[in-house]
């Protein structure tokens, strides 16, 4: 999966990162992430929702084109850029929704099986990332190969989250609102676990997966017809409103990131190099924006320094 993604969105691979190309993990990060999942769900439903097969096909092609454009733009930058990064996240959210839905819509697979399938895909991507790099920390994204693994993981989390939300809402017959409330409670568990000393990298990725069904369930609740368990708000209104909210939050984040004293300020290059070498988590890698640097257990075993490995061809 990582190799296929690389060939499509980063065929040249010549823009080597000069710094960590992900934002700081703060409360605003999670707000934007959840909003992007809801917006991506509503936009995907609008693009591939028409009963006319031709229109639905054109919508899917448009989503795929925007997905490729957004990731190519992200890979061409050599440092983290607020708008570029979050535009890529929004397009991955949209395309990831369609990828997850396609197995059910076109192959007729039940949602529990698509959930299991994308869970396996995510585990395989994470395993390949770990096997090649010895870390799953998003604050170690200082090489092109790690960036490839990161975005492959992000795409897999969106697909898994979409399938999980559809499974609970329709397969388990909970409905969209009940599913949204379920995941709103579930996403607090990684935070509690982190506060109790659980691994920061593990709790981050668990929370990251849960943001998808959380946002998507509420988006579906708003835009599905009343007879289908929703409120019947037009999909254009829903995704447009969510896009405006996301844009506003990204602008606020960009303003905070320009303040060097803010906890949202992005990494300096020298810090990025250190983090890429020893894999100690960043002071703000946890789920809470005001947690400061504390020694955290690493998936590689505490106290064992991990040095960068040579970069063979990406799998």
Image: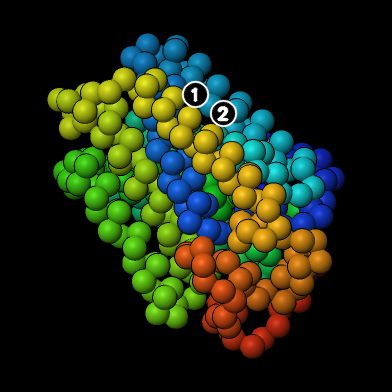
Q: Is residue 100 above or below residue 69?
A: below
Residue 303 or residue 29, whichever sits in front? 29
Q: Secondary structure at mark 2?
A: helix
Where residue 206 appears, as percent x and y from the top left, is 43, 62
Q: Secondary structure at mark 1?
A: helix
Q: Residue at x 41, y 51 (%)?
A: 211
Q: Which residue is mark 2?
A: 64
Q: Is residue 24 left or right of residue 111?
A: right
Q: Residue furthest bottom?
A: 303
Q: Is residue 311 above or below residue 94?
A: below
Where residue 280 appears, as percent x and y from the top left, is 65, 76
Residue 234 showing in the rendered view: yes
Q: CA distance from mark 2 to mark 1?
A: 6 Å
Please tell me in which quadrant of the rendered image residue 254 appears.
Answer: top right
Q: Which mark is residue 33?
A: none
Residue 270 or residue 76, whichever sits in front? 270
Where residue 95 appears, as percent x and y from the top left, is 51, 34
Q: Which residue is mark 1?
A: 60
Q: Residue at x 76, y 53 (%)?
A: 144
């Amino acid at each position: 999966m990582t190799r296929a993604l690389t060939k499509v969105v980063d065929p040249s691979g010549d823009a080597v990162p000069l710094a960590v190309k992900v934002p700081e993990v703060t409360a605003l990060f999670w707000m934007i992430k959840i909003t992007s999942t809801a917006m991506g769900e509503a936009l995907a439903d609008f693009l591939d929702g028409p009963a006319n097969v031709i229109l639905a096909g054109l919508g899917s092609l448009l989503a795929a084109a925007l997905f490729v454009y957004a990731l190519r733009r992200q890979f061409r930058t050599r440092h983290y850029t607020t708008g570029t990064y979050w535009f890529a996240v929004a397009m991955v959210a949209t395309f990831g929704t369609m990828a997850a839905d396609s197995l059910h819509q076109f192959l007729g697979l039940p949602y529990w099986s698509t959930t299991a399938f994308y869970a396996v895909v995510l585990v395989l991507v994470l395993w390949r990332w770990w096997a090649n790099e010895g870390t799953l920390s998003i604050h170690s994204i200082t090489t092109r190969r790690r960036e490839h693994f990161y975005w492959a993981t992000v795409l897999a989390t969106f697909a898994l989250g979409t399938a999980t939300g559809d499974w609970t809402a329709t397969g388990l017959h909970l409905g969209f609102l009940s599913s949204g409330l379920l995941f709103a409670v579930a996403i607090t568990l990684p935070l509690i676990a982190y506060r109790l000393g659980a691994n920061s990298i593990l709790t981050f990725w668990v929370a990251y997966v849960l943001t998808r069904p959380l946002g998507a369930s509420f988006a579906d609740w708003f835009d599905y017809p009343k007879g289908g368990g929703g409120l019947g708000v037009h999909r254009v209104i829903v995704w447009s409103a969510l896009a405006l909210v996301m844009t506003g939050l990204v602008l606020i984040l960009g303003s905070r990131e320009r303040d060097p004293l803010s906890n949202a300020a992005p990494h300096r290059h020298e810090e990025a190099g250190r983090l890429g070498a020893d894999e100690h988590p960043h002071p703000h890698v946890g789920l809470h924006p005001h947690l400061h640097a504390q020694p955290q257990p690493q998936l590689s075993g505490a106290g064992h320094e991990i040095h960068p490995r040579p970069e063979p061809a990406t799998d």
